[in-house]
């Protein structure tokens, strides 16, 4: 039975086809093929005597074919039912289907050709020719293996690769698809709506920045506010910290307090090159929520700062 399962991530949803098969059909097919093979080995029907070698080879090939399919589907069902991240599940399903396909191709080739040595030599010569003709696709396939086993990124991660930045929505054998963030028409981190495809081989010669790194689910971000030198810096710091903390508590009301210690916001001050001060608030944020969190903090902080003009002065004209 085929099932299309929606994998939901922070700001987007992708649909991946998951095939949950009824294994009884595969078991029946494998048992029938094996039973037919062993029955032919008994050679009880004299009329089929001239055809026994061919029939035996056919039934043996069908038996191996059925067993490979059965093991492949059984493995897929285990992967689909296991409790793991969607990115890991996606990679495991891709590997299982690739291995199943390769083994079936080997069985077909072995059935079509009797001389295995000739097959090996021919395969070697063909591989040599294709190796020169298809260097780029082969490199991308090797890079796919690197992505799957080393996992520099998974489906659902936000990554940056050279000038490309976006959320990974698909990892194929030869290329990766990301849903672009920012881009040519946006000045923030929101998704542009464009899908970018790039060959997997790029990651073997470029730096990959994964925004879903060791501090999952947060990264650190900061927002500066310009204030005059005559401002009450302690009051400014207090307003910014309260705004950042309040927004975090409202968005994550059930977050573990024990883990909250390392995610406390902080404020520091620096001199702007135009001769005023910048009060910079640093805070944890999900990679897909940088623009939204910045806006919410500013909406909470600015009314508090503007409510005390005797304590907070903003740069205006020639006044600093």
Image (cartoon, rainbow, N blue to C red):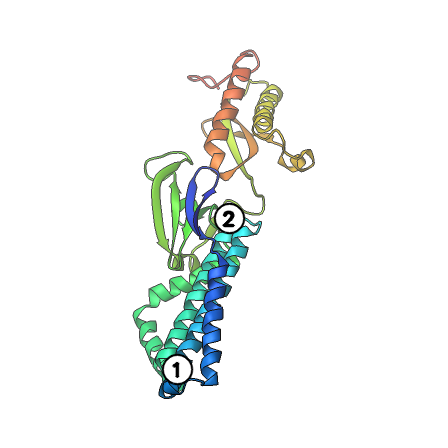
Q: Is mark 1 on a helix, strand or loop?
A: helix
Viewer-proximal residue among 51 and 261: 51
The image quarter containing residue 36 is: bottom left
Residue at (51% x, 48% y) in the render: 86
Residue 291 locus on image (x, y percent): 46, 32
Residue at (38% x, 78% y) in the render: 111
Of label 1 and label 2, which has the lower sequence position? 2
Q: Is residue 255 left or right of residue 229?
A: right
Viewer-proximal residue among 109 and 117: 109
Q: In this view, does 30 lie to the left or right of 84?
A: left
Q: Is mark 2 on a helix, strand or loop?
A: helix
Viewer-proximal residue among 17 and 21: 21
Residue 310 locus on image (x, y percent): 56, 11
Residue at (39% x, 37% y) in the render: 191
Distance (Cα) linking label 1 and label 2: 39 Å
Name the disc covering residue 120, or none: 1
Q: Is residue 195 above or below residue 222?
A: below
Residue that label 2 marks: 86
Q: Label 2: few (<14), some or many (≥20) within 10 Å?
A: some
Q: Label 1: few (<14), some or many (≥20) within 10 Å?
A: few
Residue 9 locus on image (x, y percent): 48, 41
């Amino acid at each position: 039975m085929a099932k299309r399962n929606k994998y939901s991530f922070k700001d987007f949803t992708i649909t991946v086809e998951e095939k949950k098969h009824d294994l009884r059909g595969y078991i029946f097919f494998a048992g029938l093929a094996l039973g037919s093979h062993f029955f032919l080995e008994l050679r009880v029907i004299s009329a089929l005597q001239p055809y026994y070698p061919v029939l035996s080879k056919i039934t043996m090939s069908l038996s191996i074919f059925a067993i490979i399919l059965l093991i492949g589907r059984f493995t897929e069902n285990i992967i689909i039912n296991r409790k793991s991240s969607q990115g890991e599940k996606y990679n495991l399903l891709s590997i299982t289907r690739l291995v199943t396909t390769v083994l079936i191709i080997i069985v077909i080739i072995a059935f079509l050709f009797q001389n295995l040595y000739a097959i090996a030599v021919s395969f070697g010569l063909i591989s040599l020719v294709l190796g020169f003709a298809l260097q780029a696709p082969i490199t991308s396939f090797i890079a796919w293996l690197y992505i799957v086993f080393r996992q520099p990124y998974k489906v659902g991660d936000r990554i940056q690769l050279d000038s490309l930045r976006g959320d990974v929505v698909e990892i194929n054998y030869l290329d990766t698809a990301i849903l672009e963030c920012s881009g040519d028409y946006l000045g923030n981190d929101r998704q542009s709506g464009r899908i970018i495809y790039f060959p997997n081989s790029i990651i073997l010669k470029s730096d990959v920045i994964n925004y879903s790194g060791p501090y999952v689910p947060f990264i650190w971000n900061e927002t500066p506010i310009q204030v005059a030198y005559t401002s009450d810096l302690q009051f400014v710091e207090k307003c910014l910290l309260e705004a950042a903390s309040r927004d975090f508590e409202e968005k994550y009301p059930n977050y573990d307090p024990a883990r909250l210690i390392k995610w406390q916001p902080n404020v520091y001050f620096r001199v702007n090159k135009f001769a005023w001060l910048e009060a910079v608030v640093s805070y944890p944020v999900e990679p897909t929520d940088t623009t939204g969190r910045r806006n919410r903090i500013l909406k909470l902080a600015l009314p508090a700062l503007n409510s005390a003009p005797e304590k907070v002065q903003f740069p205006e004209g020639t006044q600093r």
